[in-house]
Amino acid sequence: MYKILNILIFLSFSYTQWFSVNHDLIARSYYMSYPENISDQESAPLIINMHGFGGSALSQRYYSEMDQFAHEQGIAVVYPQGIVNSIGYTSWNVGTYWDFSNLDDVGFIEAMINKVSDDFNIDLDRIYACGMSNGGYMSYELACELEDKITAFGSVTGNFMLNQTSGQFCEFTREIPIIHFHGTSDSVVDYYPPSFDGSLTVFESSDFWIEYNDFNSDSIEDLNNNVEIYNFSNSNTNTVFKHYKVYGGGHDWFKENWGFHTSSELIDFFLQYSLSDFYNETELGDINSDSQINVLDIVLLAEIILEGLYLEEGDLNFDQTISILDLIALINLILY
């Protein structure tokens, strides 16, 4: 199947359109915004940008103003649409307090990623997620559930609803980079504990990620009189939990009047990371686990493809399948 991009390759403007994907027998919608001047030999990073409680895909697109920053860097943005819940508002099902429906929103996001990458030239090594408010909660949820597909995560005024009381425990396979923007005067989602919904507020969340990512260093930068930037890190890795603390800021997607634009900062943060950064190259492609990558691995991978099996070390393009594309990637890895 030809990708939609190949039809539009000579157009000199960005491509925007509604799409849908069937998940759990429901047609789920999303608004796709693809940058101009991407050739059929190139692939674009993808940012998933999720609206807040009661919001919509289009309102989030206009509110966040992300397209203008993303397209100039060749980045695609997809705006998924939440479904109206049992109390009459669009939302994302992040569990516990916010469990107003039994919809599998994580599964929808995964299905959407697969459909978007089928229709457009997407760099599967550079897929990112962010959201406003309830969409920020959802971004944290995806950090727990889809870290094998999404590289880095951003939350804007959305807390971390770690659902341990309902049996959810995040089981990660790698370090997780996160950036969180929050105003100290947010009257909707609490900045300071305790939160109204049992979620982890920003510094409670940072404590969780400091322990998980084994961070041993922190710093505070004064961006201006109203904004402090916290960085929690480890000297042995470039993975960071980054927090913009906006004194007097409300429930907002912060823009230039605060000395920065949230969308621009999200993009700069995201582009530091690729999914392959978090996998040991001697493991990725080392099919026979002998700490070497050579022709023996090519032979074994070919056998795995013929038998229709899956092996994580052989999934060199991170699409959750093993195919001839992975074999070509392995050959290129050895040759170049």
Image (spheres, rainbow, N blue to C red):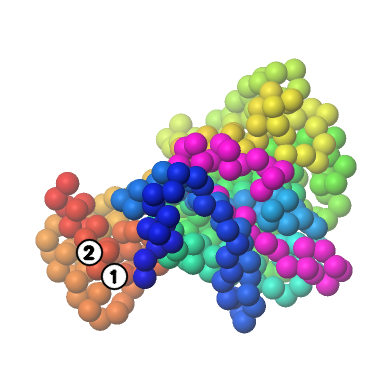
Q: Position of residue 314 (x, y in %)?
A: 29, 64
Amino acid type of the residue that numbered disc 1 sits on in the rendered structure: Ser
Quadrant in which residue 259 is drawn: top right
Give the answer, above or below, for where 211 lies relative to 142: above
Amino acid type of the residue that numbered disc 2 sits on in the rendered structure: Leu
Identified at 40% across, 63% down, the residue is: 3
Left or right? Give the position of 31 relative to 185.
left
Residue ID for mark 1: 323
Identified at 54% across, 65% down, the residue is: 112
Q: Position of residue 182 (x, y in %)?
A: 74, 38
Q: Position of residue 55 (x, y in %)?
A: 77, 55
Q: Nearer the viewer, residue 252 or 65?
A: 65
Left or right? Give the position of 116 relative to 276.
right
Q: Rounded to the nearest whole Å, what is the CA distance between mark 1 and mark 2?
A: 7 Å
Quick one: which residue is furthest to the left in this view?
A: 295
Residue ID for mark 2: 327
Residue 141 on the magenta segment: no
Identified at 37% across, 66% down, the residue is: 2
Left or right? Give the position of 291 relative to 230.
left
Q: Position of residue 169 (x, y in %)?
A: 62, 63
Q: Quadrant of the N terminus?
A: bottom left
Which segment is the magenta one? 61-90
Q: Secondary structure at mark 1?
A: loop
